Amino acid sequence: MLKNPKQAADSLMDWYHVHKRDLPFRGIDNPYFTWVSEIMLQQTQVDTAVPYFNRFIKRFDTVCTLANASEDEVLKYWEGLGYYRRAKHLHESAKRICFEMDGVFPSDLKTIESLKGVGRYIARAIHSIAFNEPSAAVDGNVLRVISRLTGYDQDLMKPANARVVEGVAQSMIEHAPPRDFTQALMELGATVCQKSPKCDVCPMQSMCVAYQTDTQGELPVMIKNTKRTEKTYHVFVTTHEKKVFLVRRPDNGLLANLYTFPQYEGDLKTALKSFESEFKVDVDTHDEAFKLDHIFSHQVWHLVVHRVELKDDSALSFVSLTDFPYAIAKAHLKIIDQLKVI
């Protein structure tokens, strides 16, 4: 499928050594750091993840430091990154490594993949980057690069077709230092072979089938059949002397254990009654402040935000956001930012 894997690998490596970005999780011989960075980079842009990585590692500098921390503190350090299940899985797996593996990060590919929250891609990324093993890691960037390079036009949402692409990457990684190759291929996809590719500066332009046939815009083929569920919630913001009323969500389901303003589905009248009933308060006045949408991987929340005044707020416990020690859901951090309630 790829005529000369060695030539492609050589061209990629020559480019990478000149153009790679200076990132805090590169060039560090620490599988724990690699693991944390790969978990953070799931569904998060590099520029967004970097400051979170730096802060997280400064606080949790070893896997056992992370394992011995409380879940609340871990979530607080993850606050704003979203997809909090990643942090919970990271914490659970840290406990396994610390207490069952004597704090030594596993070097075996199957064991790495067995860690909670670590799938095929992340396991192979860790195996190659942290341990310099020739395990080809294929994420969205790599799917895009290889499909264009080879002209592969099959639906990459099908696992069997994604494995074909992985096979091409595997044929290339054998001709380069694995840790550098894995990062180089991701780097090319992130900075050059983007959705709108910069073919004029691509090191593999001369061997790229998509470039030669002018089909870059058609590749990769990824037919998504998933449709996000849409839900509308009324959100009630109650303040008292520059403090706010927040509630902790249940320990299961979406945003488990995170803090939010009270929110309810249904029409406004029903939502207000639910709010009054749950917290044993009487609403005096309420005004719609604004609306905003928050997109999850499988849901879209349409949030209608209301400022609420109560006849008597003594039944509620208000908190200051400036030193609040628990994690607030990203959707509600947006509300806080827009309301400027701090």
Image (cartoon, grey):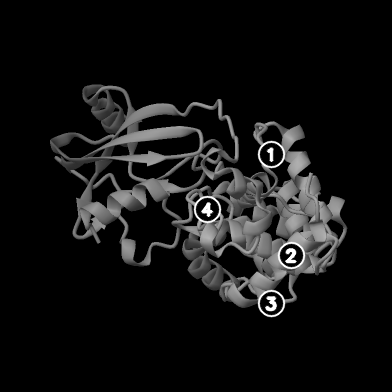
- Amino acid beneath label 3: Gly
Image position of 217 with respect to 239: above or below? above
- Amino acid beneath label 2: Phe
Front position among marks 4 and 1: 1
**Mark 2 or 3, nearer chain start:** 3
Residue under label 3: 27
CB atoms at circles 2 and 1 under 8 Å apart?
no
**Mark 2 or 1, nearer chain start:** 1
For residue 57, which quarter of the picture? bottom right
List x then y, in percent, for residue 182: 72, 61
Residue under label 4: 194
How far, Cα to Cα, is label 2 from label 3? 13 Å
Q: Secondary structure at mark 2?
A: helix
Residue under label 1: 152
How far, Cα to Cα, is label 2 from label 4? 18 Å
CB atoms at circles 3 and 1 under 8 Å apart?
no
How far, Cα to Cα, is label 3 from label 1? 33 Å
Badge 4 density bin: few <14, some 14–19, many ≥20, Cα 10 Å: some
List x then y, in percent, for residue 193: 56, 55
Q: Which mark is residue 181?
A: 2
**Mark 3 or 4, nearer chain start:** 3
CB atoms at circles 4 and 1 under 8 Å apart?
no
